Image (cartoon, grey):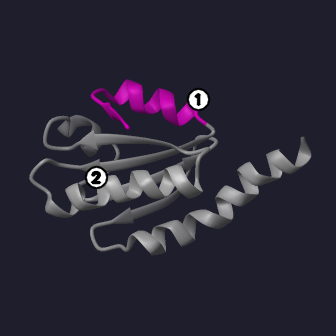
Amino acid sequence: MQQLTTIEELDNLIQTQPGLVVLFGGAHCGVCNVIKPKLAQALAEDFAQLMLVYVDCQVTTDICSQKGVFSLPVVQVYIDGQRFIEKTRNFSLPGLLADLSRPYSMRFETDVNEN
């Protein structure tokens, strides 16, 4: 999982990656530290076409403020440059993965079937 340090890196990935999941967290956020490896594992197993990146809001406050992140954790999902999902503070990982399944299958699994 790549850790981003500039808004330019994040904006570039949003525009160039077909699927991007951004986890905004912090070193002192207990929930963030628990969800980070579980999210990485779940995406690797079930959503392999999505790139996962991490933004440490305690280190790079400018990225978080520019993306409207003022509480932790936050997960934003971008598909083809558009934000499809945003989950903040109190969310469940199974709920997030369930919400991901439809847009993921529409964007990525149809590509596989066309080839």
Q: Residues within 10 Å of mark 2 (few under 14, many from 20)?
A: some
Residue visible at 9% across and 53% down in the picture = 28
**For residue 15, which quarter of the picture?**
top right
Tell me where residue 38 appears, x and y as whole percent: 36, 59
Residue visible at 39% across and 65% down in the picture = 87
View extreme (right): residue: 114
Is 56 left, or right, of 3 in this rendering? left
Q: Could you say which is closer to the camera, residue 58 or residue 108?
A: 108
Q: Residues within 10 Å of mark 1 (few under 14, many from 20)?
A: few
Report the mark closest to the observer, 1 or 2.
Answer: 1
Q: Could you say which is closer to the camera, residue 101 or residue 89?
A: 101
What numbered label is drawn on residue 16?
1
Q: Say what amino acid the circle numbered 1 marks.
A: Thr
What numbered label is drawn on residue 32?
none
Q: Say what amino acid the circle numbered 2 marks.
A: Val
Tell me where residue 67 appears, x and y as whole percent: 35, 45
Residue visible at 55% across and 72% down in the picture = 98
Tell me where residue 26 appears, x and y as whole percent: 17, 49
Residue designated by label 2:
69
**For residue 32, which quarter of the picture?**
bottom left
Instruction: Report the magenta residues as a range.
Output: 1-17
Q: Is residue 100 visible?
A: yes
